Image: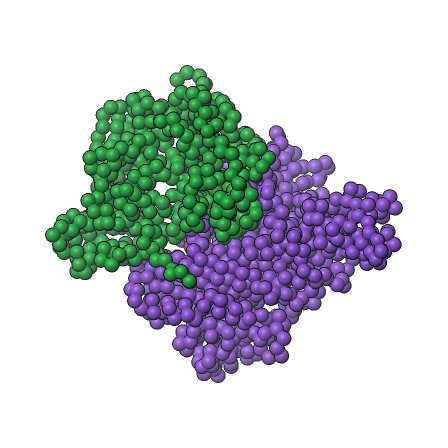
Chain colours: A green, B purple
Amino acid sequence: MAGPHSNLTLSLNGKTLRVPDCAPTTTLLDWLRYDQGLTGTKEGCAEGDCGACTVVVRDLSSDGTLRQRTVNACIQLLPMMHGKEVITVEHLSITGTPHPVQTAMAAEGGSQCGFCTPGFVMSLWHGHLTDASVEESDVADQLAGNLCRCTGYGPILRAAAAARALPTAPDDRPDAAERLKQMKTRALTHEVADGWFRAPRDIHNLAALIAVHPDATLLAGATDIGLWVTKNGFRPEKIIHLGDCTELAKIEETETGIRIGAAVTHGDAMAALGALCPDFEELWRRFASVQVRAAGTVCGNIANGSPIGDAAPALIAAGATVTLRKRDRKRVLPLEAFFVEYGKQDRQPGEFVESIDVPRPADPEALKIYKISKRFDQDITAVLAAIHVRVTDDVVSDARIALGGMAAIPMRARGTEAALIGRPLDDRAIGAAIRALANDVTPLSDHRASAAYRLKAAQNLLMKYYLERTFGPQRVTGPGRYEMAAP
Amino acid sequence: MDGTNQTPEVSAPDPDSAALPHDSAARHVAGRAPYADDLAEPSRMVHLALGLSTIARGRIVEADLEPVRAAPGVVAVLTADDIPGINDTGPVIHDEPALALSANGGEVQFCGQPLFIVIAETRDAARAAARLAAISYETQAPVLTIDDAISAGSYLHEPYRMVRGEAKIAVAAAPRRLKGRIDMGGQDHFYLEGQIAIATPGEGEEMHILSSTQHPSEVQAVVAHNLSLPANAVTVEVRRMGGGFGGKETQGNLIAVAAALAARVTGRPAKLRLDRDDDMVMTGKRHPFRVAYEVGFDTDGRILGVRIEQWANCGWSHDLSAAIADRAMFHADNAYFYPAVEITSHRCRTNLVSMTAFRGFGGPQGVLGAERMIEHIAYDLKLDPLIVRRRNFYDPMGAIPARSITPYHMIVEDCVIDEIVSDLASSARYEQRRAEIARWNEASPVLKRGLALTPVKFGISFTTSHLNQAGALVLIYQDGSVMLNHGGTEMGQGLHRKIIQIAAGELGLDPSAVRITATRTDKVPNTSATAASSGTDLNGMAVKDACDQLKARLAGHLGLEDPVFADGMIRWDGGETSWAEAVKSAYFARVSLAASGFYRTPDIHWDKEKARGRPFYYFAYGAAMTEVVLDTLTGENRMLRADILHDVGKSLNPGVDLGQVEGGFIQGVGWLTTEELFWDAEGALKTHAPSTYKIPTAGDRPDVMNVRLWEKGENRALTVRRSKAVGEPPLMLGTSAFLALCHAANADGVWRAIDAPATAERMLMAL
C-alpha cells in the first residue's frame, strides 16, 4: 500500500469534518471527548453495557431515506462513521432551547448524579423523533441499554411520556438527509502509520480484499471487537469493515425462509426473524440492548464463534445454514457444522460469513426459545435452550434441540432428540429426553451459573416446553408472561 | 460559634422552592454539567495506570518493571519506594499500603491490589505499559470466604458484643425456640462515573486535587501524609460525582495519592481515571455477611430473647469495617423490641478487596437478618409474618416506653413504624392479596407468587460521634448575590438543592440568588464524609448558623431587632428595604458580609467499651410491600408490584426525597436479586464489569409502583425544618422483594432458608 492517505469524512452535529489521521482503532467516544471536546457523552464502562456514551448515528439507506439509530460510542470505531452523521447531546439544545425530552427529564427528576443522563436523553430523543411508543414497558425496552444507578428508572420512564405532551421541537432530519446526500463519500480507505481500515461498498471488492488479506480483522458492528480494543489493547494492523457493503445489508425472502446478509444488524433482523417465529423476536429483544442491536450483526454473532452467543442455538434449532464466501466461491454449511471446537470455526483463510439462511418453521409455535440469565435484559446467557419438536400423526417426527452455555460450542442435543423421535410427545417421552440430556452436555461452572444449575435448568426447560405446548405460556418474562390482574 | 444552642426553624418549607428539581438538572440533561474527566486537559498532562496483582495472597519474589519503563510513551514507573511520606491510604487504621511493591518485594493481600504506578504521555500508553510487568510470586492459599476465615481464625480484631439482659436464659426459658442462618452477598456500587483524580502541582510544595470523592478532607489528609506535606499544602476540590453510594467515601484515597505522587515526581498535571474493570476489581464493596440467630418466643410470636451472631467479610484491611459491622449490630433489631438480647459480631479478615461503605453501611445486613428471623417465627407458628412483625414493634411514640429500649440501651422515642405499616397494609390491601395469592398458587403448578411487607427503622447519625459536625461558608457580595460553600459533597442526592433552599429560605431570597460552587477543603476545613445520610442534617444546620450570623449583622446595621427576611426584602414594623440595598449599605458601613457556620449534633454519645449510649439523634422509618412471581422450573423471577410508604419528616423537597426513596428501593432490590459478586477459587473477581455484574435495568422495575412520602411525618428531633435524612433508609425497603420471593418459594408450605442474592440459580436450587 502507498503512504498515509484517507478519505474519512463524517458529519458531527451537522458539520462535515475530514478526519484523515486518526488511528484506525480510535473509538468514536475518545474522539468526541478528547479531540472534539464534546464531553457531554460519557464513558461509564467502555464495553457497550451502560449506555452513558449513547449517541445517534444517521445515514442514508440504499433508497436514499434517512436511517437513524442509537449506538454506544465507546465501542464504535471512528472510521465506521465514514459517510455518516453523528449527533451528540450537545446538539439537542444548540438553539438555546432544550428539547422536550431534556425539559421533561429535568422536570420529572430524571437526573440525580447526572452521569448517565446524556445517554438517556439521547435514547429518549431518538425514541421521540421516531415516534416510538411511550408505554412504560416499551420505553423500558428502549432504555434497556442505559443503566442508571440513582433513580430506579421511574422518573425517566415518566419523562418519556411527559416529553410527548410538550410542544414539539423542530425536526432536523430533513436537513440531515440533505447533508448526507451532499457529503458524497466514496468507499473508505483510511491508511495511517498505525495501520489501515478499509470499507469496500461493493461485494466483489470486499471479497477480493478479504482474500488478499486473510490476516485482516473482519469487522461488522464492533460490538465485540470494540471491547478487544478498549479492554485488551487490541490494535490490529489491518481492518476490513463489512458494514458499508450494500449487498450484505439486505434481508431477502427466499423460498424457504429468509436470508440475512453479513451487514444486517440485530435490530434490522429482529422483525423479520419474529415473523418466522415469535420467540425469535423476544430472544433478539433480550440478548442485546437497542444500541447493541443497532450495531451488532447476526452474522457477526455467528462468525465470532462464542459458546454463549445467543443467535447460534436459536438458529440451529430452526435449521439455519451459513454461507461462506471466498472471492466468488461459496460454500453452504448447516450452522451447527460451522462450530468445530472452542474458539475454532470452519472458516478458511480468505473466507468470510456472507449470509445466514433461516428456514420458516412449519409450525412457529413448535419452536420455543428459552434464555436464562441473571437479569432479563442485556445479559449474557447462562443457559439457552431452543427446542423445536415436530409432531406428525401423534408421533414426534423431527426434533431439533440446540443449547447454548452447555458446552464449549453451541450444540445440538442429539441424544435428547433421539429420545423423542418416533414416540408420542407425552410424560414418558419427556422423561426420557430429560434423562438423555445429562449425557449430551458438558456444562461449565462459572460466574454466570454452576454446572449443576445449568443441567437442571436445561432439563426443566424440556419439561417447560412440554407443559407450554399443552397448557400455554408458563413464563415470568416475555410474550405470554404472567401479568397481574388490575388492582 | 457553638452551633448547638440555636433554635432551629420549624416552619414548613417554602412550597415554590420545594418543587425545584436537582440544582444541576438543566445542565445534566444538556451534557453541560462537567465531571472531573470532562475538563479540558492541559497540554503537558500525564496519564496514569496502575499495575495490579494477579494473585490474592503471597509475596512478590521478583518484579521486572524494565519492560514497563521501556514501553512507548512511558515517563516514569513508581513503586512504594517513591512515596516520600507514609505509604498508606487507610482511613482509620493505617494498614493499607497505597502501593504493595517496593525494592524488597512486597506482600500481596488481594487479587487486584495496586503494586506500581505507570506515568505516561497518554492514557492508552499508560494502560498498555502496565500490562508488561513481569512479576513472580510465592503464592499462599488465600482466605476468601467467611468459612475460610472462621477455619483460619482470621479476624481484624476481637469479636464485639452488645448485650442487654440475659438472652441465653430468656431463649432457654421461652415456650418456643428456633435457630437459623442467612448468608448474603456483597454489592458493587456501580457508580456510573468511575474513580478519578487529577492532581495539579502548584507553587512550592502545593498540590491541588480534583477528586471524585465523598470525603475531600480525608483525601487531603491522605495525600498530605503520603507526600509528607502539611495539610495546608493540599487542596481538594469536588464539584460533583457521577454517583457515590459510599463507594467514594474512602476508595478515592488511593486514586488521589497516585495522581498527586505523579504530579510531584513529574511536575506536571496528572490524571488517573480507572477503567471500569480495574475499578471493580480494585475498589471495595458492600460487605458479604452471615447472620445466625437463636430466638425464643411465645406462642403469639412475641420475641422473648434473641442471640444473634454476625460475621462480616471485611476483606484484607480495616477500612471502615469496624463501624460498618457496628451498624449491622445497631440494626440487628430493625424495628423490633428484644426483651433480652446478645449480639456478637465477627470481623473476618480475608484476601478479598477491602469491603467498604455502601448505602446503609451494614444496616441492610442487620435488617435482613432480623427479617429472616421474623419470617421463621411466623412459619413456625403458622402465623402471617405481618402479625408477628407488628407484635414485636417498638412501642409507638408517645406511649409509656415499656418496649422501647434497643440492644444498645437507647430508648426509641420516635417510633412511628406501626402507624406506617398499618397505613400501607390497608392501602395496598395486604391481607386480601396474601389470601388471593395463596388461592392462586394452589392452582398454578409452575408459577408461584409471593408477597411480603417489611418495615425499616434506621438510626441517623455517624455512630462515631465526633464525625457529627459540619461547617459552612456564606459570602454576600456587594451586588447582593450569595456564594455558599459547605462541607457536603454532591453525588446526585440533591444535597446542594436542599442547601440552597435552606439558605434562600433563611435569607428570604430567591433560590437563584444563591450559588453553591465546588466543595473545597480551603473553603470549609475538617469536614466529615458526606455519608450516613447526614448531608442535609449537618450541613444544612451549619449553613443556617452562618445565615443567622449574617442576618444578625444586617439587622444590627439597620438598627433592627428581628426583622423579617422574605421575598428579597428586609421588613420590620413600619418599614422595609430591599436585600440589595441593605447589603450595599452594610458594605459601606464596613460590616463583614462573610460568615462561617458550624453545627454539631446534640444529645448523642456512645460508650464503646460498654456498647451502650445514644448513638443516634433520631430514627427514620418506612415500609414496603412487594409482590413477585417465581418460575419454579427455572428460578427466574420478577417483581410485579411495589407499594412504599416512607417517613422523611417534613420533606424539604418531595421530588428529591421521592427520588431517593424510589432509587434506594431499586438499589436494595438489586443487591438481593440480580447483583451477584463472584470470586473464583483463586480469589479473582469474575464479575468486574456491567457485562457480568447485573444491576437493575428499567425493565426490572415492577409494572405497578406506588411510592408515597408519609404525610404525617415530622421529625421530633430539632433538625432543619423537622425533616429527616433520606439517603440510606430506603435501600432496606428492598428487603420486601427478597422476602416475597422466599414466600413464593415456600408456597408449598415447606420452610426453605434461601440465601441472598436470589438469583434464578439460587431460587431453583433451593426448591
State left or right for residue B190 relative to residue B585.
left
- Considering only vertical position in the picture, is B702 above or below B368? above
Residue depicted at 43% across the width and 38% down the height: A130
- Residue B649 against residue A394 in the figure, above or below: below
Q: In the image, residue B269 lies at what x, y percent? A: 63, 35
List x then y, in percent, for residue B730: 54, 60
**Residue B744, quarter of the rendered image:** bottom left
Left or right for A211, reference B513: left
Question: Which corner quadrant holds the C terminus of chain A?
Answer: bottom left
Of B587 and A60, the residue lying toward us: A60
Q: Residue at x 75, y 56 (%)?
A: B545
Q: Residue B391 versus residue B429: which sits nearer the camera? A: B429
The residue lying furthest to the top in this view is A2
Give the quarter of the figure containing the N terminus of chain A. Answer: top left
Determine whether, in the image, residue B329 is placed left or right of residue B520. Answer: left
The residue at 63%/37% (across/down) is B263
Who's the residue at 29% across and 26% down the image? A350
Q: Is residue B686 visible?
A: no
